Image (cartoon, rainbow, N blue to C red):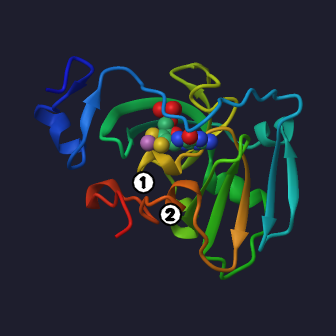
Amino acid sequence: MLGKFFQKPTGEDAMRVPPGQHLASGFPVLTYGETPQVDTNTWEFRVWGSVIPKVFTWDDFMKLPHSEFTADFHCVTRWSKLDVKWTGIKVTDFIKAIEVERLVKHVMEHCYGGYTTNISIDDLLREENFFAFNLFGEPLSAEHGGPMRLVVPHLYAWKSAKWINGLEFLGSEELGFWERNGYHKRGEPWAEERYSS
Ligand SMILES: Nc1nc2c(c(=O)[nH]1)N[C@H]1C(S)=C(S)[C@@H](COP(=O)(O)O)O[C@H]1N2
Ligand SMILES: [Mo]
């Protein structure tokens, strides 16, 4: 019994929903712990590690090119939402504003509130990934990660860090919060990379 909030995908949608997932009718909120209240006046975004360290204010960050995105969203707890509409900044545009050391293979995403999640540089630097500040035409709400979150559509959504405030470029792979607690290191939904074995 799935109930009225989670439906089995039908028709065309069935092809777009990874194995073991159901469609959510709304946009559920999934947060571990408290929701940080982050003010854009004091917001900062840092890069450190194997990179020339740099701190962006909200205004610095918003000067980067803005783009519109439509992306599917897959939570490892088995709900998916198709065609989520965002406005944001492409990761591939952001990366041009910093100087990452060559040969870096791994990155840690850091957030207000202390959440972390690891990602490989190849998974991070994909054209379709973005930092989001609008959701369905409205400023991104705090519960969905506002004022700024990362969205990585091709991996389970625990990699899409809410309240993101930094990227740490790593010399070797480290594990983030859920990855240390049994989730898969990569989390590719079509391969059902849910848990580490
Ligand atoms: N900082 C932070 N980011 C996070 C989480 C979190 O608990 N804290 N939860 C992750 C998980 S498990 C999912 S499914 C998505 C949920 O995003 P939503 O609440 O906007 O649906 O955010 C991800 N990013
Ligand atoms: Mo999730």
Separation (CA) of disc 1 from disc 2 = 8 Å
Residue 123's mark? 2
- Which amino acid type is marked by label 2? Asp
- At a point 40% along the width and 53% down the height, the residue shown is 154
Query: Could you tell me if residue 113 is visible in this image?
Result: yes
Whole-percent x, y for residue 5 in the image: 27, 20
Looking at the rendered structure, the kind of residue marked 1 is Leu
Q: In which quarter of the image is the N terminus?
A: top left
The residue at label 2 has a CB less than 8 Å from ligand 1: no
Disc 1 residue crowd, few under 14, some 14–19, many 20+, Cα 10 Å: many
Q: Please tell me which of labels 1 and 2 falls first in the chain.
A: 2
- Secondary structure type for disc 2: helix
Q: Which of 115 and 103 is in front in this view?
A: 115
What is the number of callouts on the image?
A: 2
Q: In which quarter of the image is residue 169?
A: bottom right
Image side of residue 136 versus residue 57, left or right: left
How many residues crowd around disc 2 within 10 Å: few (fewer than 14), some, or many (20 or more)?
some
- The image shows residue 145, relative to residue 48, as above or below, that is above
How far from the left and from the top, in percent, is residue 18? Answer: 24, 48
- The answer to which image quadrant residue 99 occupies is bottom right
Q: What element carries label 1?
A: loop
Seen from the viewer's position, the closer of residues 67 and 84 is: 84
Coordinates of residue 113 in the picture (x, y in percent): 71, 40
* Residue 125 in view (yes/no): no
Could you tell me if the residues under marks 1 and 2 are in contact, i.e. CB atoms within 8 Å? Answer: yes
Relative height, residue 196 to residue 151 (above, below): below
Residue found at the far bottom of this picture:
103
Residue corresponding to mark 1: 155
